[in-house]
Amino acid sequence: MRIVVDRDLCDGHGMCEAMAHEYFQLDDDDVMHVLDDSPPESDRAKVHAAVQACPALALTLEG
Ligand code: SF4
């Protein structure tokens, strides 16, 4: 499983961080960073929820 971010769509809402702060982090300029783009299968539900929560539809889960 791999987290893919469409940087053109992401505008720093931070919902992803709220749902899964282990994987998504906003910096001081509200730029979101993926801390680990290859989560283990055991975290699929959590990462999937974060992807779904993005209001800009900027996140995709591959695999
Ligand atoms: S919720 Fe979506 S738009 Fe907001 S920071 Fe995360 S990926 Fe970007």
Image: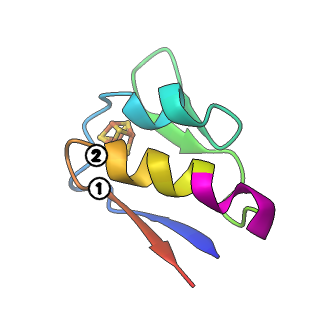
Numbered disc 1: secondary structure: loop
Residue 15, horizontal then vertical, whole percent: 38, 31
Instruction: Compare marks 1 and 2 and give the one earlier in the sequence.
Output: 2
| Dot 2 amino acid type | Cys
Q: Is residue 2 left or right of residue 61?
A: right
Q: Residues within 10 Å of mark 1 (few under 14, many from 20)?
A: some
Residue ID at (73%, 62%): 39
Residue at the spot of label 1 = 58
Q: Are marks 1 and 2 in contact (CB under 8 Å)?
A: yes
* Residue 54, image quadrant: top left
Picture coordinates of residue 25 (x, y %)?
A: 58, 31
Q: Main secondary structure of the magenta part?
A: helix
Question: Image height check: is 38 above or below 23?
Answer: below
Identify the image's colour scheme: rainbow, by chain, secondary structure or one colour.
rainbow
Picture coordinates of residue 52, whole percent (x, y):
35, 52
Q: Hey, which residue is sitting farthest top in the picture?
A: 28
- Asked if one can make out residue 20 in the rendered structure from this viewpoint, the answer is yes
- The residue at the point 41 percent across, 19 percent down is 29
Specify whether tag 1 is near ligand 1 (CB below 8 Å).
yes
- Which residue is tagged 2? 10
Which span of residues is magenta-colored? Answer: 41-45
Mark 2 residue's CB less than 8 Å from ligand 1:
yes
Classify the position of the N terminus by image quarter: bottom right
Q: Nearer the viewer, residue 52 or 14?
A: 52
Q: Residue at x 72, y 54 (%)?
A: 36
Residue 23 lies, with reference to residue 8, above or below; the image says above
Q: Residues within 10 Å of mark 2 (few under 14, many from 20)?
A: some
